[in-house]
Image (cartoon, grey):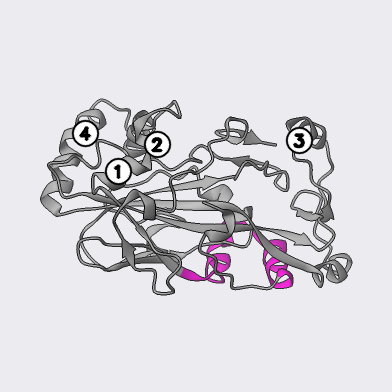
Amino acid sequence: MLIHDAYLQLSMSPKEYIEQIDTYEYSTREQFINKLPKVVISRCPLCDALYTGPIDMHTLWDWRYVLDSPPLPRDPHFYTEGKFESVGCDHFFTVQPFLNMNQRIPSEMDEFVNGFHVPFVSDWMVPDNRSVIAVIHSMAVCRLEKSDGTAFDFYTAEFENLPQTLDGMEERSYRELHPIDMDMLHPHLADAKFVPRYTAYAITYWGEKTDRDAIYNAKMQPQIANMDREDSPFDLIWLSAMPVKKSDPQYDLRTWVERGKLQWLDITDDGLPLKSGTVEEFPYADIPFDQDTAGRVWY
């Protein structure tokens, strides 16, 4: 799966985007979200209804608030809170976001958490005796770069040659924070463009209500009863189900396709129709699993 094969939709120019970042605060995140393109996140394999929502494909900037969000049962919550995302049917169960670095280091960020970077299908979510099916979709996430290869550093607010080694990241941990200077950046932004560097994946689970309820009651409810009330039950359960080793069969997406438990959106078709079929047709069989960029907190 090559990075340029992922679905990409942008809604702002580099200048417009940096202007949004310049005035960005988490308390006003809704204003930023409203500027983002509303795209297809998934499609129901039972009735073909769409699941849509706003997603930032311009840069990693706003993804800081995404990857530590728990997948919630019966609540659409891929990129934003449910009020921004909409599902066109009652078959939706839950969605899990992943962000793959494609073996790059996110050196343009001052702080970045990435716990889920290689998509997997949870075996307890798609038992053979239940109707629940997973659907995977990919979306490119860009980096703001100039033609000379420099990229925008969100900490120094300048275009720089960014390091791609862990040693380089350690050296940059002491760099000075700078505010955005639009006058200084203006000539640089004229030469800048959004270049796909990372890939976001959504794995969404769909099924009939009786089957969703059976899975919830069998797998989640017993653990919820034993948890502290301040914990996020579904988040902890999901983490406990996350495969630790890359040899874990849950990472073998080919197997889920063969079992008829994983479908995908065809990004070669503008209509993004659902596809299911042979492993040879499946485009996500070899997503890179990079130990150096997995599960790290970047400063």
Residue placed under numbered mark 3 in the picture: 169
Drawn side of residue 62 relative to residue 238, left or right = right
Pick the front one: 180 or 166: 166
> Disc 3 residue type?
Met
Expressed as whole percent of the image width and height from the top left, the position of residue 249 reads: 35, 32
Q: Earlier in the sequence, mark 4 or mark 3?
A: 3
Whole-Å distance between the Cαs marked 3 and 2?
A: 29 Å
Q: Main secondary structure of the magenta part?
A: helix
Mark linked to residue 256:
1
Whole-Å distance between the Cαs marked 1 and 3?
A: 37 Å
Disc 2 and disc 4 in contact, CB within 8 angstroms: no
Mark linked to residue 251:
2
Mark linked to residue 219:
4
Whole-Å distance between the Cαs marked 2 and 4?
A: 20 Å
Drawn side of residue 19 relative to residue 37, left or right = right
> Disc 4 residue type?
Lys
Q: Which residues are magenta?
A: 14-38
Pick the front one: 6 or 241: 6
Between label 1 and label 3, give the one nearer the viewer: 1
Disc 2 and disc 1 in contact, CB within 8 angstroms: no
Whole-Å distance between the Cαs marked 1 and 4?
A: 20 Å
Between label 1 and label 4, give the one nearer the viewer: 1
